[in-house]
């Protein structure tokens, strides 16, 4: 997702063959609920962009360490 606002994803499984299953760049107000991947990669999700803000991850089946990001703490919140 690139330059997006107000995206809500519920009950999604992505089966990526290589690379991150999802890349978020300059997004805000994103909710990911019950989002998972069957991919073996460590970089499950990549999040970047100076305008990225307010990402909520809840009920997801991947570890927080599998989120690759250089954003300040608090931008990505996990419940």
Image (spheres, rainbow, N blue to C red):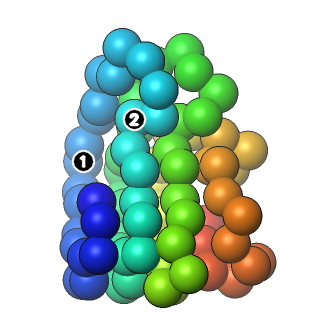
Residue at disc 2, secondary structure = loop
Q: Position of residue 4 (x, y in %)?
A: 25, 76
**Residue in the image at 60% along x and 34% along y:** 43
Instruction: Note whether 1 is above or below 11 in the view shown.
Output: below
**Which quarter of the image is occupied by the C terminus?**
bottom right
Between disc 2 and disc 1, the foreground one is: 2
**Which quarter of the image is occupied by the N terminus?**
bottom left
Comparing 27 with 79, the one in front is 27
Name which quarter of the figure residue 66 lies in: top right
Q: Which mark is residue 11?
A: 1
In-image side of 22 versus 45 (left or right) = left
Q: Residues within 10 Å of mark 1 (few under 14, many from 20)?
A: few
**Residue in the image at 24% along x and 83% along y:** 6
According to the image, label 2 marks what residue?
Answer: 21
Instruction: Note whether 3 is above or below 62 in the view shown.
Output: below
**Residue in the image at 25% along x and 43% along y:** 12
C-alpha span from label 2 to label 1: 15 Å
The reply to whether residue 55 is visible in this rendering is yes
Residue at disc 1, secondary structure = strand
Q: Which mark is residue 76?
A: none
In-image side of 6 versus 44 (left or right) = left
């Amino acid at each position: 997702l690139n330059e997006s606002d107000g995206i809500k994803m519920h009950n999604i499984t992505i089966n990526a063959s290589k690379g991150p299953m999802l890349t978020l760049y300059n997004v805000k107000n994103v909710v990911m609920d019950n989002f998972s991947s069957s991919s073996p990669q460590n970089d499950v999700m990549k999040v970047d962009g100076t305008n990225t803000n307010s990402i909520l991850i809840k009920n997801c089946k991947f570890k927080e360490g599998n989120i690759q990001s250089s954003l300040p703490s608090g931008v990505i919140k996990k419940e």
